[in-house]
Image (cartoon, rainbow, N blue to C red):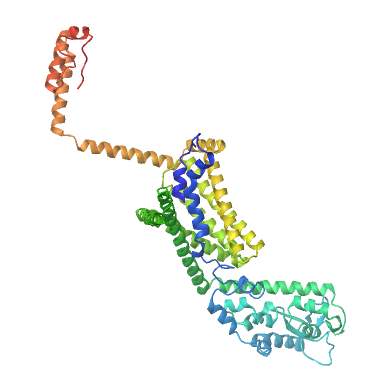
Amino acid sequence: MSNFVQAVNKGYEPDPDENIFDSLFQQYEKVIVESLITSFGLDFLVKDQHGGDVDTIHNVRQIGVDEKMQYKSAQNKANYDNRGEYDRAAYHNDPRYRKVVAQAKKDFNEKGILQDDTYVEGNKVIPKRNKTIPAGKQGQLDHVVSAKEIHNDRGRVLAGIDGRELANSPDNLRYTNAALNKNLSDKSVEEYIAWCEANPDKIDWRGNKGEPLPDHVKKKLREEYNRAKKAYDAKLAAKYYTSPQFAADTAKAAGARGFQMGIRQATGLIFTEVWFAIREEMVYVQTPFNMEHFLNSISKGIKNGFERAKEKYKEVLERFKDGALAGALSSITTTLCNIFFTTAKNVVKIIRQSYASLVQAAKIMLLNPDNLPFGERMRATSKIIATGASVVFGTFVQEALSEMIKIPTVGDIVSTFCGTLISGVLTCTLLFFLDQSKIINKMVTVLDKLPSMDTNIQYFRELAEYFDQYAAELMSIDIDKFRQETILYNQLAEKLEYVNSEQEENKILKSALQIIGISLPWTGDFNSFMGDKTQRLVFE
């Protein structure tokens, strides 16, 4: 696309006798057709997935919540399926858990230290189990993020960290009274609060069954949970996103997406050449219609199209390289986005198309392969971005219509057609505006006059070419002949310097012309010749 955009960037004046839209479409047809073939006709070559191509902690946690979400890696799915059942005893008998409990008991027995109840303000609890102590005063160690929640967390399994290690980390262990701890059980904080609202007669947060859970306890439960969950998620992120597994999956996805995009872009150029070759052959279809001749024309057009594409193999390779780079960058960007939020398939496509345009625009801006002046370079870059933006907008329309029209098959056809049509019309309009707008042309003229490094480089390139040409001319000179001519001209100059009359000067010049071999442009006496109107001066 970029090569054609640069080609039409030189300026275009429509024929005043021709319909303006005919002129417009003739000018931009190739870039529009290639864009539409690539973006809508060949998108099947690039298989976008809901949530990108790499498993992230955020995305795997959406499985079961988001019906479109699924594992990207079969191995990651198998790891989760084989995690085993939650074993409460294993978590609560873990040495790290028992060590905290033992230390608290020792402090109470030796020093009489009571523990603060984490969730009930001002409440102290005795860190040991004793039937004679009221439930509101019995101290038990609580997993702030419940051990069961940690065990069944897809993000934890993806990161490959032992659940007992995370559950029994110091920042996830807090003391509370036995009644509240038992009431919480294996429920998460939000599950417990919802359960309290649904079962008011079963609430028991300090040994007084049926007592409503006050707002300040709800607030403290949430605060502690958010603090512990933040620390917990940070550990998962640090482990998984710096792991060789994530790096390998990201690189593999980027490579696959780059290859697919490269094939897509190169194939788009080839199919565009084939289309225009077929269209040219259609002009020669005979009237009345003859099926055999018609099919022969199509066959010839296809053959010519592939031949043209072969001749443009360097451009095809450039398209592949640009597409591969855009595909790899879009895959990496999509993966990074999915660390924080889920990208839908249409968002993935938009990111991909945006990079396809940005790579080509950056190529013009930074490398300037066609040595365009700064203003024209900005215009060419704007055209590429405008074309990409048109495709993105068409994708939005296609996605919106596909959600509105639920008729099988027909809905897909209508939405694709409308998206393609809007992209084509919008691309055509923007390209024409960028070429014909007086404001744009004035801006380009001003920018072209600005000095830039490229301008200086181009000046020295042209200067070097002139020197090369002059050097080549010097190399072809006969040196001996050149020396003889130089001596002759010096002698002539010396004689002319000392002449005393016009007759003597005339004689010297005639003699020099004879030596050099140049004939006089007249014959006979000069005055008589010039007085005869039938005569003509002849210069050889």
Q: Is residue 404 left or right of residue 25?
A: right
Residue 241: percent from the left, percent from the top? 56, 71
Q: Is residue 10 above or below residue 120?
A: above
Q: Residue at x 52, y 37 (%)?
A: 441
Which quadrant would the C terminus be assigned to in this image?
A: top left
Q: Count the numbered circles shown.
A: 0
Q: Is residue 408 above or below residue 358?
A: below
Q: Quick one: 465 or 303, which is closer to the camera?
A: 303
Is residue 324 something one can see in this rendering? Answer: no
Q: Residue at x 46, y 38 (%)?
A: 451
Residue 72: percent from the left, percent from the top? 55, 73
Q: Quick one: 529 or 157, which is closer to the camera?
A: 529
* The image quarter in which residue 48 lies: bottom right
* The image quarter in which residue 174 lies: bottom right
Residue 364: percent from the left, percent from the top? 46, 48
Q: Is residue 37 left or right of residue 92?
A: left
Residue 230: percent from the left, percent from the top? 67, 71
Q: Residue at x 44, y 42 (%)?
A: 372
Q: Is residue 233 left or right of residue 11?
A: right
Q: Quick one: 142 or 247, which is closer to the camera?
A: 247
Residue ranking furthest to the front: 288
Is residue 456 something one can see in this rendering? Answer: yes
